[in-house]
Image: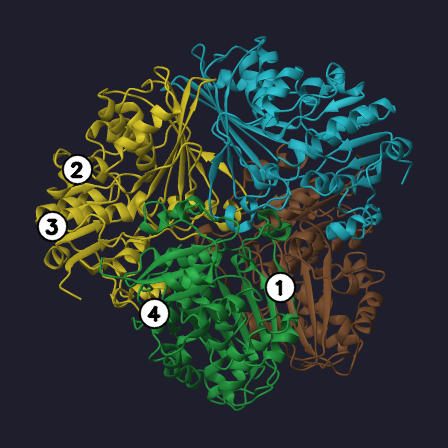
Chain colours: A cyan, B yellow, C green, D brown
């Protein structure tokens, strides 16, 4: 294999860490040379994830996170650690000239006050917010290419923004009164030991959580507000936990601004994403399912015009771990390192 | 065991049939003396459902559906056959003086034209519609007690009506613009062989279906319209398929009509259901889960007041097979036969 | 409700505790007056398990475990705490004249040395072993009736012993070379927070564990050895983790001692369990499934005679939480308190 | 993309068809130019499998199966149709000079009488049996390279043969008395509409089936017999249905022929598979899980020496759809077409 660009991963033990390792195991342009974890340092990746046995990446020994070491070894580092923790590491790496893709929420919101309000935490590096690029490739690929710090979008926001942006940009729907009802697989809850995430507490059941106060709300409002040029836009964003591993399905409800036929609405969507191969606008009459995007970067979108209630209903699905986290991070890294955006991501969904 | 009232079940092979058989297996006041199926006649119930081995009900031989035979043998008959089929059998039995609980949609809508419009079928017995009682015990127990024909509510409507009625009756929310986002377990799709309901097509995935045109819509509109005295009310009702066996969770969104505190809203709900032991209004801050009502008649309701978006969000859960179908049918039959409404239904949920 | 006998439950937060609370919620002869937990004392049962809202038992406040308090309040106490912990509490309660059903392994093995060898722990109350009765109602109901201390059988052993005993007692199979391949639902792993039991680590996967060294092995050997009068009998007992909540299926393989027809083998099984209504020997050609016993005391057994390989194959299923733990404990308590063995346990399986 | 070799797929609608399409969607050396189905002809692949939208393969229109058309268009054809149907198509294609990989059982057994006995069907093309190669790459890669007709191994046999062959070849275990207890995900039951495979009949339950008479038995006996040079070898092979989509776990029990340490046994396995990168022999103390091979060609093997019962226990897992069917078929096709065996198969498992 030709020379590959050395990259690092801070926080390898969670589901986003595993997923990134899976994708990097077969990547032709990047080589994972550092993977860190405070709790698992000293083990190899295949000790932790037997799925990686037999791949060169599986032999990598997990190390402690050290900015100097990472900066010496890597051109780019992925941060897969919780918000609040990521910001300091990001700052340390940026200072050392390393490129950073942060999978946490720390640099997604442009406004440090909004961050403080929703995350209950003062931002310790607000000076980096202006230069951080929101890494949604369909919208910001050009800026990502030259960024040193990319804030990887949240999983729910990725589905909601891609689903609603065309309608808002085209003025099909009113900007107020939007309801976003999202349902996520359980990998979204992370890999920490907790009773609420046990198999016997999640399987064969379904629940809502964080209604009206999920932290992904301001991220959605920021980006959709930018799309329709309306700062201060609010949406009702609400989340549920699915007994599946991967996948988010978002059902969004918006009042039509004017009479529109299903065909017109469909055209708006098709045109907006005609150069975005990862966004698949389904034919009218079809609705998406999470399984059809499993393990990939696809965002499948189905739209329904309901004249009875004067509403546009948009259903969008993604794989929360791949498109909603690690795959998108890899796409951003590809752009930042001058590679094709889909390098290592040309995968067909695993069905079933 | 003392004398029990003889009852019959037309259509025993589906999930609602199985569930009714489960409940009747241990019922002290009714005895199942007829269970019919065109495809399985001649077998015993335990041949079909090994779970019923060892119960007297398991020895019952399945027969062909015959109104004369049913009328001769039974005081009351449950119809667990598809809409369109049920109406003729109901009429035949009513004519013969038998009490009927119809689990299909055939007698739920008061207006035969609305029925024709949503079900694509002319009603062949509109003369029975005025006397059919919508069998939601919390609302219509008195009328059910004296009814000869009860239309057992749909599963989705049961969750939506119980969830929204208090807010609408008290005028907390606007009557237009309501969005109802419902998610149902797969027993709701029935027990017929179909590729779309195979394990490998449902597990580890999630999908929306019938957006804006689910047939339970007019039933919800009829009943909520009655609650708030507004004929012609419309709601946006939308459905999703969960990879679980039992359970419906409905998330309903309504705009607040006036400023209301969470405590005030909670009081409205608690008071409305203070004499309805099957409706459990959860403490503020708690949200319901389908597992906590599994196998029972409970409807658990959680409410959230979201001042940011000026919305009341109501989450209601039921077991779609028990409260949403067979258990509710049994409660109605209890009332019609002069038994305690909860006879045979005093069950604690199976968790996990 | 008539006077009910006051009972206590030490260790209410695990799955066996929840299950016992579910069964006691509707029990006509016992009243739960104490439920203890070191971590959750002060809460009510319904705080912990919203499923119990609306039941009188849900209002019970969890207390700290105190032998004097338990002895003053209860005639009988269930111990649902880990092995090693249970033995001291059992001894304290027995000393105070309270009847005890211990759901742990502490008093199942007659031989303290075998206990020490498999559990890595010296038994601190070997003096109680001779009087402890192994609480398998089909075998030891008479002794249980007069016991003060009952050792509730393990979940796996219940399925294995009921499945193999008839063949061994009748001399159909050789006593050496028996292979027992068992598969259990995940409630068997308990309710403690651990990464290995997370939904995303258990769903859509399957694994073996503890091959050749599961602690339930000596319990099976002790009881099967007693059945065939052969001390020191060994079996190869091996376990797997199923992505389901409840249920154990055990497939047991034994070499036929002599030529036997399927009908003869079936007769041996039917006769042995003809007075044991909870053991359902399936017709030849049928094999059991875990769902058909869900939530109940049933043990369903299917047998296959394989002349090609000269083997008897026995498949037995139980609900590991109900028959394999709390339901069986309740049956034992019923016997110890002079109630009908099936009081509170006349339940039809929840299918699906 | 460079010129790719044109191939065809007869029977595209089942799970093995979907899986092969998934793998071919990203294959650099083959191009799918024909996909046939009697029931779905006229649709595109993406109509059938929305997961393939956006891939060139998704635009392929499904045609009716016609040997002349297939022979004119394809160098190699995969047959993913039921046994009994496959043999005629295979013969017609072989006659026309096309290479064939048959995923059915029709050419796996060398002996037409054994086929007739287990499949209840006279073989209509016994003349092809001598030249058909059993396509297990670890054993027969050289013969596959020059074969015109490859019989793709069954899913269960793949796991059982790879798991037991080293021990048998090295004489570690006795050849009689072997018990193979296998558990398969539900894709193994196929994609036809049937009540027994519905989500609500499979999820949250577990069952055994076809004990002692599964049709994969003679295939296992043929291949293991060849390994240890013992014609007429018998094994007790028994199967169970797992509520998961993909994956087989086989637990095999064999009596040790002589005293052997775990380290010695492990060495036997490691050496046999040292040049077989798809077979991963786990370190002693580790046991495999189906999730760690999901979507790939890996066969993970864990071994346990149990001196108490004088047994070797081998646990082997594969993905039944990929390694157990379509992936293995693709590996065989790679060999037959002169490509690298792992072309298009260098995938990291999707976890979770």
In the rendered image, which residue does mark 1 sit on? D105
Q: Give the label, 1 or 2, closer to the camera.
A: 2
- Chain letter for the residue marked with disc 1 in the picture: D
Name the quarter where the N terminus of chain D is drawn: top right
Q: Give the label, 2 or 4, closer to the camera.
A: 4
Q: Pointers 4 and 3 in contact (CB under 8 A)?
A: no
| Sequence-first tag of 3 and 2 | 3
- Chain letter for the residue marked with disc 4 in the picture: C
In the rendered image, which residue does mark 4 sit on? C334
Residue A237 in the image: state x and y as whole percent: 51, 24
Q: Is residue C307 above or below residue A153?
A: below
Q: Pointers 1 and 3 in contact (CB under 8 A)?
A: no
Do dots 3 and 2 share one subunit?
yes
Spatial CA span between label 4 and label 1: 55 Å
Q: Pointers 2 and 4 in contact (CB under 8 A)?
A: no
| Quarter location, residue A22 | top right
For the question of whether residue A250 can be seen, the reply is yes
Q: Pointers 3 and 2 in contact (CB under 8 A)?
A: no
Task: Give whichever of D169, C343 is nearer the camera.
Answer: C343
Secondary structure state at the residue bearing disc 4: helix
In the rendered image, which residue does mark 3 sit on? B98
In the rendered image, which residue does mark 2 sit on? B133
In the drawing, what numbered circle is on residue A152?
Answer: none
- Chain letter for the residue marked with disc 2 in the picture: B
């Amino acid at each position: 294999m030709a020379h590959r660009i050395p990259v690092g991963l801070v926080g390898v033990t969670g589901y986003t860490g595993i997923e990134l390792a899976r994708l990097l195991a077969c990547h032709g342009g990047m080589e994972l040379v550092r993977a860190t974890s405070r709790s698992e340092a000293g083990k190899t990746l295949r000790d932790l994830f037997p799925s990686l046995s037999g791949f060169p990446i599986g032999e990598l020994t997990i190390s402690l996170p050290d900015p100097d070491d990472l900066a010496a070894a890597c051109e780019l580092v992925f941060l897969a650690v919780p918000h609040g923790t990521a910001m300091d590491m990001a700052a340390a790496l940026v200072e050392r000239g390393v490129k950073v893709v942060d999978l946490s929420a720390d640099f997604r919101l442009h406004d440090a006050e909004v961050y403080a309000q929703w995350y209950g935490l003062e931002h310790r590096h607000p000076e980096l917010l202006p230069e951080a690029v929101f890494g949604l490739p369909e919208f910001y690929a050009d800026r990502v290419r030259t960024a040193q710090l990319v804030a990887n979008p949240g999983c729910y926001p990725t589905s909601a923004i891609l689903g609603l942006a065309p309608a808002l940009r085209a003025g099909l729907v009113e900007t107020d009164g939007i309801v976003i009802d999202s349902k996520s697989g359980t990998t979204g809850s992370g890999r920490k030991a907790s009773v609420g995430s046990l198999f016997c507490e999640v399987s064969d059941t379904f629940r809502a959580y964080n209604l009206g106060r999920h932290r992904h709300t301001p991220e959605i409002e920021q980006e959709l507000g930018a799309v329709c040029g309306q700062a201060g836009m609010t949406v009702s964003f609400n989340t549920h936990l699915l007994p599946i591993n991967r996948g988010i399905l978002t059902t969004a409800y918006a009042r039509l601004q004017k009479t529109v036929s299903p065909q017109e609405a469909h055209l708006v969507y098709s045109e907006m994403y005609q150069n975005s191969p990862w966004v698949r606008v389904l034919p009218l009459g079809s609705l998406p399912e999470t399984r059809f995007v499993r393990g990939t970067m696809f965002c499948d979108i189905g739209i329904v015009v309901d004249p009875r209630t004067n509403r546009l209903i948009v259903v969008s699905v993604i794989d929360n771990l791949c498109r909603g986290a690690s795959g998108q991070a890899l796409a951003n890294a590809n752009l930042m390192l001058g590679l094709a955006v889909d390098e290592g991501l040309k995968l067909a969904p695993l069905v079933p």
